[in-house]
Every structure is written in C-alpha cells, then in structure tokens.
Amino acid sequence: MYVCLCKAVTDSQIKSAAEQSNGCFRSVRESLGVGTVCGSCACEAKKLVKASARKQLSDNSLFYQPA
Ligand code: FES
C-alpha cells in the first residue's frame, strides 16, 4: 500500500528501511524521501517506523514480552 504518494513509497519499503536504520525516522526520511514534499504522510510513516522498531526490539529480546 502506498503511504507516500508524492514519492511513491509503500509501507513495505518503509518497514524495510526502518529495519536497516534501527528505527530512526530521520534516516528513513532521508533514504526514501517520505514526508519531504507535502508532509501529509509523515505521521503514518513515523507510526510504521515505530512499530517496526518495537517489533525488532521484541524479536531480539532475551526475555518474554507479552503482546
Ligand atoms: Fe509523502 Fe506528500 S505524501 S510527502
């Protein structure tokens, strides 16, 4: 699904970039250009980056974390 129409960026591209940048939205924004034209996608893109970082954290945790 397209999240950023200005730059034609999909949710899976954002998730992938978030994993590579350890959940840093600034890095994702710089690499994909999300939120850099009209800015209307920034909030949704940030949510995706946060969710991806949270998932990565729980996947790498040594301890059980209930959902
Ligand atoms: Fe992403 Fe416009 S929709 S910058």
Image (cartoon, grey):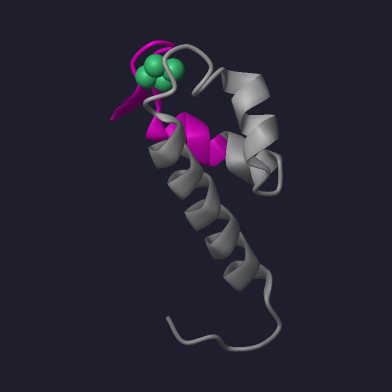
Q: Quadrant of the C terminus?
A: bottom left
In the image, residue 5 lies in the stretch drawn in magenta: yes
Q: Residue furthest left?
A: 1
Q: Which residues are magenta?
A: 1-16
| Residue at image coords 53%, 46% | 49
Q: Is residue 37 above or below residue 50?
A: above
| Residue at image coords 45%, 48% | 47
Between 15 and 34, the one nearer to me in the picture? 34
In the image, 49: left or right of 8?
right
Q: Quadrant of the N terminus?
A: top left
In the image, 38: left or right of 31?
left
| Residue at image coords 54%, 85% | 65
In the image, 60: left or right of 41?
right
In the image, residue 26 lies in the stretch drawn in magenta: no
Between 1 and 34, the one nearer to me in the picture? 34
Ligand 1 quarter of the rendering: top left
